[in-house]
Amino acid sequence: MIGSFLADGYIPPGAEEVFPPEIFGQVPWFDKAILLVIISVFVISVFLWAAVRRPALVPGRMQFTGELLYNFVRNGIGRDIIGSKDYMTFVPLLFTLFTYIMVNNLWGVTPFVSFPPMAHIAFPMVLALIVLVVYNVAGIRRQGLGRYFKDVMFIPGVPAFVYPILAPIELLTILFIRPFTLTLRLFANMFAGHMLLLVFVTGAEYMIFEVSNPALKAAGLLTGVLAIVMSLFELFVELFQAYIFALLTALYISGAVNEGH
Amino acid sequence: MTVLVAEINPLVPKTAEIVVALITFGILYWFVAKIVVPRFEKTYAERTEAIEGGLAKAEEAQASAAAALEQYQAQLADARGEAGQIREEARTQGAAILVEMRQQAQAEADRLVTNAQAQIEAERSSAVASLHAEVGTLASQLAAKIVGESLANDEIQQRVIDRFLADLESQPSGRAN
Amino acid sequence: MRSGSTSASAEAAGGYILAGLLIFGGVGVWLDRTLHTGVLTPLGIVVGCLAGGYLVYLRVVRASPDALIEEQNGSSPPMAEGDSR
């Protein structure tokens, strides 16, 4: 069946689908992801401005939504993970990360757009590198360069001969693995989610409109329903990835600034 | 298609996107850190303050109400005490007046009785005195008439009268009256 | 929140094991190539995974509040016994 499917002319989506052609011919670098990221930042700014423009003790609907979001990041991620002593320093970063990733991800399930910019590895990579710099600098500032790396590499209560084995792993973890996994997790989730949705959507489209076989048409309808279900699942993944990125950032910062770790 | 896949490696970041990511994230971070977070925090602080202020105000009102109640109760207790005092005073005064009046009445009565007795005594004395004189005269006149001659000697006459009177007095006074 | 912390701990654990695997696996590959042997790569991978797992125990399991509470509860006699052995 798949053979006849392909013979009919169905082309499955490939990696190139994540890289649609540049939208403005004159500006070669200006792709869809860049456009969406700029729109995202604009949308977030407008929303946040509406939320804080006229702060009232009894909040209106916009302010209430904004406060809900802000509280979630400030208390649920910042205060609970980093601790009451110095979490406020990092709340702006966590809140920016969370909203930036969340809104950009939501393009993935927006009708007629359905493209998450985080599926382009440059964006998660930049965010992860920012996080890398922030938690290391925070740790060095708090404890001093020597003590920070000593704390990281030499855990108390471990026999001395184990240090040469553990120390390089720790060093690699804080300097490379953490940003690497942050990048890859976000990128891979968005990339795979996008591909998955594309397969379902284009498959359903092809089966319903291009194939004359009625059984395949029915299967196409089923695929279409599945595409909607998958979209809901993608929505969850997109929100969760924004949350987990901010949460891990808080966790890394906490490990760096809270002594005795 | 194969050409495209070979050209595009999703794991290689595009320089333009790196730059855009840095700039957009920077702008958003600046906006959040300079405007959004301070405003949210300010609203929180004000809200907390408002709630705490409201609590303080309520406490104050409660305290003043309690003070008013206390004052009222104190006043009530004062008034009650005063009334009791007045009543007590009245009672003692009334008793004193009663005693005084009783004493006065008694004194009056005593005085009346004494006066009456004194008057009676005086009248009796004067009656006795006048009777003395009258009886003496009458007796001597009677004796003269009987004897037929006046007693020549005053001394004797006096002696007779005295004896008579002594006799008279030695008799029970009831018969004399 | 609890599930979030748990999944975050799991992520951190995966990071340590991945780091151990990369370092010692890489050292194994390099040694195998220079010494023309064939056993050092799998050995390195095993050592790396074990070391990463040990770090997970030290950093995540031992440092988490739940583990701390358990440790404190059973600290007095059983721990002393264990130490003397």
Image (cartoon, coloured by chain):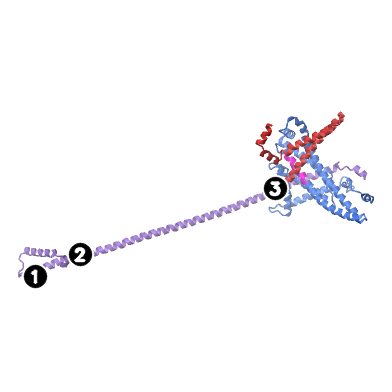
**Residue at the image point whose x is 33% and y is 60% from the top:** B100
Tell me if residue B170 can be seen.
yes
A53 or B2: which is nearer to us?
A: B2
Name the amino acid, label 3.
Answer: Glu
Q: Nearer the viewer, residue A251 or A162?
A: A162
Q: Which chain is purple?
A: B
Q: In this rendering, would B108 be left or right of B158?
A: right
Q: Secondary structure at mark 3?
A: helix
Chain painted red: C
Give yes or no for residue B50 being in the magenta stretch. no
The residue at which mark 3 appears reads as: B41
Question: In this rendering, do the residues under marks 3 and 2 share a single chain?
Answer: yes
Please give the letter of the chain rendered in blue.
Answer: A
Rate crowding at label 3 as few (under 14), some (14 to 19) or many (20 or more) other CA atoms within 10 Å.
few
Give neighbour class at mark 1: few <14, some 14-19, many 20+ (Cα, 10 Å).
few
- Quarter of the picture containing the C terminus of chain A is top right
Q: Crowding at label 2, few (<14), some or many (≥20) Cα neighbours within 10 Å?
A: few
Q: Which mark is residue A35?
A: none
Going by the image, does B114 lie left or right of A149? left
Picture quadrant where residue B176 is located:
bottom left
Depth order, front residue of A3/B62: A3
| Residue that carries the numbered disc 2 in the rendered image | B122
Boundaries of the magenta span: A242-254
Q: Dot 1 corresponds to which residue?
A: B142
